[in-house]
Image: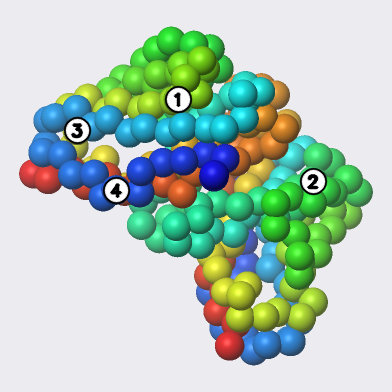
Amino acid sequence: EAQVTQNPRYLITVTGKKLTVTCSQNMNHEYMSWYRQDPGLGLRQIYYSMNVEVTDKGDVPEGYKVSRKEKRNFPLILESPSPNQTSLYFCASSLSIPGASQETQYFGPGTRLLVL
Amino acid sequence: QKEVEQNSGPLSVPEGAIASLNCTYSDRGSQSFFWYRQYSGKSPELIMFIYSNGDKEDGRFTAQLNKASQYVSLLIRDSQPSDSATYLCAVIAHDMRFGAGTRLTVKP
């Protein structure tokens, strides 16, 4: 089954404790991205990657890091989480850059993060 | 001004009616337009995309694009309670930008 998986699905942590949210896709997609979703603000892109070892900042990259060492995985790293990073996070992937083809962007199930 | 604006709703329509969802965008260079549906607590799923001015129909859904007015809409005909969800408009110019979404409730 074609899918994007994220782990963990729910996470409660404390300020400053490093955490990683994993994202994996089994569709051999080149493009992957991370979004956060907050009430009234919609989905905002954090980082994206167009291929292995190619990553770039989205709208709200501050406080986040990513890596793309393998095509299927795109982990999101919060080196020192703060309460303003409490949010719902989605990983997404697509065959190519959204809009470059008629391929849809597939979203993972989401990770709900609470930083105390 | 937000780059992609949607009325947050909630929009409430009776079952069987037409639901009309609207979205405006600020970047005149925008080329691709998408509508996603998001059920509460779930991830967004693509339901329509449109690239050219005019209408595009897919089953009960019709997307309408007017680039001159920087306006894209989604019509849902014969609305069903299962259509109750938040609908996200997304626009691609240099990158993909989402609106905050419109919450739709279809009442039986």
**Residue at the disc numbered 4:** B9
Q: How is the image coloured?
A: rainbow
Q: Earlier in the sequence, mark 3 or mark 1?
A: 1
Q: Do marks 2 and 3 share a subunit? A: no
Q: Quadrant of the C terminus of chain B?
A: top left
In the foreground, A88 or A3: A88
Q: Do marks 1 and 2 share a subunit? A: no
Disc 4: CA contacts within 10 A as few (<14), some (14-19) or many (>=20): few
Q: Quadrant of the N terminus of chain B?
A: top right
Q: Earlier in the sequence, mark 3 or mark 4?
A: 4
Look at 44% across and 25% down and name the residue there.
Answer: B72
Amino acid type indicated by mark 2: Ser
Left or right relative to A47: residue A104: left
In the foreground, B40 or B22: B22
State which chain disc 1 sits on.
B
- The Cα–Cα distance between marks 4 and 1, rounded to whole angstroms, is 17 Å
**Which label sits on residue A49?**
2
Element type at mark 2: strand
Place residue B74 in its image quadrant.
top left
- The Cα–Cα distance between marks 3 and 1, rounded to whole angstroms, is 22 Å
**Which label sits on residue B71?**
1
Indicate the position of residue B35 as horizontal and vertical percent values. Answer: 45, 33
Look at 50% across and 52% down and name the residue there.
Answer: A42
Q: Are marks 4 and 1 in contact (CB under 8 Å)?
A: no
Element type at mark 4: loop
**Which label sits on residue B79?**
3
State which mark lies toward you, 3 or 4: 4
Place residue B30 in its image quadrant.
top right
Residue that sits furthest to the front in the current view: B1
